[in-house]
Amino acid sequence: MDRLQAMETFVRVIEAGSFRQAADTLNVLPSTVTRNIKELESHLGARLLNRTTRALSATDAGLRFYDSCKAILRELEEAEALASQRAEALRGTIKIGTTSSLARHCLIPALPAFTRRYPQIELDLRLSDTTVDVVQQGLDCVIRTGALRSSQLVARRIGNFHWIVCAAPDYLEQNGIPGNLQALKQHVAVGYLGGHAGRFAHWQFQDGAQATAIGMKESIRVNDTDAYVDAGIAGLGLIRVASYMVREHLTSGRLIRVLEGLHAEPEPISVLYSYSRHLSPAVRAFVDWSAEVVAQASKQW
């Protein structure tokens, strides 16, 4: 018995409502459909259909098996489409978690190309600057920045960025340009309220093998990354920010980078998802696409 063929036959019977109509859609004889269903029930050791001269209905076991068959056949179709590059056949909704800043400065500008390549895939972006539980939130994958804590998730590094210190020209004109880490103590910073609130912040620096923490006095504190950058542009203090967030502002001159002599290692950008041998082809397509986009963008950061 060809189990895959038998599963497809069973699905057609349920959806057509009769053996004869299922045979017509499959372009086979009704006797072939009858034989496939009998062999399938014998193989499973369970009755899948209640058959009378006037009606055909699925048993409880048949309904459960129907749902499983539909899922398997759909995944098979998507896998074949992905392998043969028939992108238009990939479909479904993907739930993605990432930070608002990475979405705004990297992913969203590139998404039109993704939707053109995969027109049947819908994306549901869940944006948060706090770490979320992939399984608990029902996410298919997340894209995170920085070092990763150990977890049961599959992690794939797809790019890099650097932490940089910068400020508005007006601020540096009035307060001077810090020439080294110790000079930062004479400056004020814009504070960012991430997972905790505090009056003073410590900026962590890694110059080669040397790790240093500098306590920064804050002029203002915000809990939004865009507002954080805007406060720096407004001249309210120094900001320490991911390089991908301020590339355009550095190019335009609205912000000026300081302490460029630091030689810190680049920070990783990773995509994470639950370990599963049945990972949806649509999710795999998004993971591969995001890796292309972030890797390309990283060259400019």
Image (cartoon, rainbow, N blue to C red):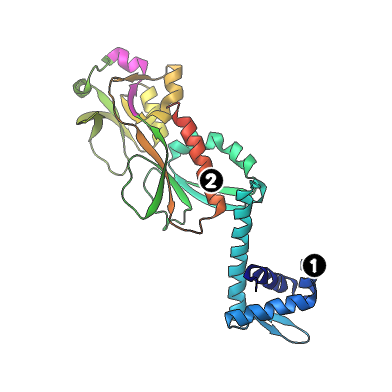
In this rendering, position of residue 235 left or right of residue 81: left
Specify the quadrant that holds the N terminus: bottom right
Most foreground residue, 200 or 204: 204
The answer to which image quadrant residue 265 occupies is top left
Most foreground residue, 81 or 112: 81
- The span shown in magenta is 163-174
Spot occupied by residue 245 in the image (x, y as percentages of width and height): 42, 30
The answer to which image quadrant residue 55 occupies is bottom right
Spot occupied by residue 180 in the image (x, y as percentages of width and height): 22, 19
Spot occupied by residue 97 in the image (x, y as percentages of width and height): 45, 47
For residue 186, above or below residue 86? above
Most foreground residue, 79 or 164: 79
Most foreground residue, 118 or 94: 118
Badge 2 amino acid:
Phe
Reading the image, the residue beneath label 1 is: 27
Whether residue 101 is visible, yes or no, is: yes
Q: What residue appears at the point 36 percent right and 25 percent down from the top-left corner?
A: 232
For residue 67, above or below residue 256? below
Specify the quadrant that holds the C terminus: top left
For residue 256, above or below residue 69? above
Farthest residue toward the bottom? 52
Q: What residue appears at the point 43 percent right and 25 percent down from the top-left corner?
A: 247
Reading the image, the residue beneath label 2 is: 286
Q: Are marks 1 and 2 in contact (CB under 8 Å)?
A: no
What is the secondary structure assignment of the residue under circle 1?
loop
- The crowd level at tag 2 (other Cα within 10 Å; few <14, some 14-19, many 20+) is some
Cα–Cα gap, marks 1 and 2: 36 Å
Mark number displayed over residue 295: none
In this rendering, position of residue 217 left or right of residue 27: left
Badge 1 amino acid:
Asn
